[in-house]
Image: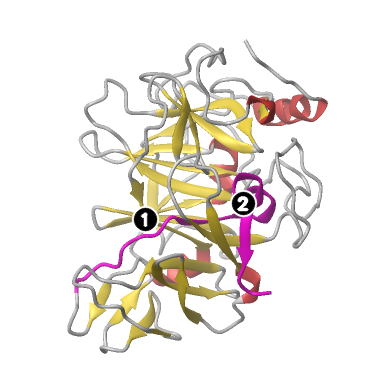
Amino acid sequence: MFRIRSKTALVLFSVLIGTGCSSGGSGGGAGPEVVVDDTEWLISRDFVVDGGPGTDGIPSLLNPNFESASTILTVNPNDLAIAVKHNDEIKIYPHDIMDWHEIVNDGPEDDPFILSYCPLTGSSLAWLGTPADENTTFGVSGLLYNSNLLLYDRQSRSLWSQMYETSVTGTRIRELPQRVQLIEAKFGTLRDMYPDAMVMTRNTGYIRDYPDYPYGNYRESASLLFPVSNADNRMHPKTRVIGIRSGTGVTPDILTRVYQLGAFGSATQAINDQFENQSIVVVGNTDLDFAVIYDRELADGTILNFAPVENDLPNIMSDNEGNVWDAFGTAVSGPRAGAQLEMTKSYTAFWFAWVAHFSNAEIYFN
């Protein structure tokens, strides 16, 4: 079995595991270690490292408990959280819980989804499950690539790169999951947007010090805990950016562009932009700590131009036809009410992680 252990990894192991846990809440049950063998890989094994806790040492969650955003008292309004919209239902997952579990297996049995958050790369993504599988749940493999979470699915035990959004080794290699829309923002922002949304609670079945960030000053430090394949000093490594990429999977010469969340300003900004052959709109607000990227071209070929909407959350932009759109890209009023903007291959992550995975990164706000 291929394994790299570091002193740092062992310290993290003691922090994450030493708190103890109950048997409840598991995202499908711990299994044997994920074995890294000599089968085909889409990524360089030189930068696949063992993070320390081992397979399922960081326990994923299965169908957690929720409370209304309007009543929950355990989430700091200034802390980051993730809102997922699935089948017109919006759920919010606080970072302080995701820091300790990284994966939530949620949704009904016939339409599951998997939310993953990697605290080392600051990236969150949600994928549809495959209900036809014998076991649709995913777990934390204990392995990292470029400091980023490698998930494993419990049916085939294939490994999946979170930031490449594909299986990188195993019987499901090159398989691409279907994306589920999410927004990352301050909890107070998400609560203002969707006060009726349900929020994941700390009643997980595990004993963890959820208010305590488990990685010390990592979010502010320029230092990394694990090696990465590419570095770029144009920004502080932990600068939060929303990036968009061309292509899918692990493809050489992928083109990318990033927008710093700290550069949008205190007023909501809507940027009508072109990326490759795609017309996109980038909407963000530094004070509210959110940014989203949607396709501006509709199914009928119309390309819309957007302007920001202020103080009307969850509505964040309007267009040249008089439609108003919310943060999930849905037209809430106007001649296209009910229409949905297409998602793009975009998400938020730390700058160092973005350029480690995608070396050809253009910075918009320079």
- Residue underneath mark 2: 354
Q: Is residue 358 magenta?
A: yes
Q: Is residue 152 left or right of residue 218?
A: left
The amino acid beneath tag 1 is: Gln
What percent of the width, then of the height, locates residue 357? 60, 45
Residue 53 occupies which quadrant of the picture? top right
Q: CA distance from mark 1 to mark 2?
A: 19 Å
Which circle, 1 or 2, is nearer the viewer? Answer: 2
The answer to whether residue 75 shows anywhere in this view is no
Mark 1 nearby-residue class (10 Å; few <14, some 14–19, many ≥20): some
Which residues are drawn in magenta?
338-366
Residue under the image location 41 percent in, 32 percent down: 174
Secondary element type, mark 2: helix
Q: Are marks 1 and 2 in contact (CB under 8 Å)?
A: no
The amino acid beneath tag 2 is: Trp
Q: Is residue 329 left or right of residue 262?
A: left
Q: Is residue 203 magenta?
A: no
Mark 2 nearby-residue class (10 Å; few <14, some 14–19, many ≥20): many
Residue 1 occupies which quadrant of the picture? top right
Of 40 and 59, which appears nearest the observer?
40
Q: Quadrant of the C terminus?
A: bottom right
Relative height, residue 113 to residue 350 (above, below):
above
Of 232 and 54, which appears nearest the observer?
232
Relative height, residue 84 to residue 227 (above, below):
below
Residue under the image location 71 percent in, 55 percent down: 238
The answer to whether residue 188 shows anywhere in this view is yes
What percent of the width, then of the height, locates residue 126? 41, 46
Q: Earlier in the sequence, mark 1 or mark 2?
A: 1
What percent of the width, then of the height, locates residue 115? 43, 43
- Residue underneath mark 1: 181
Residue under the image location 37 percent in, 28 percent down: 137
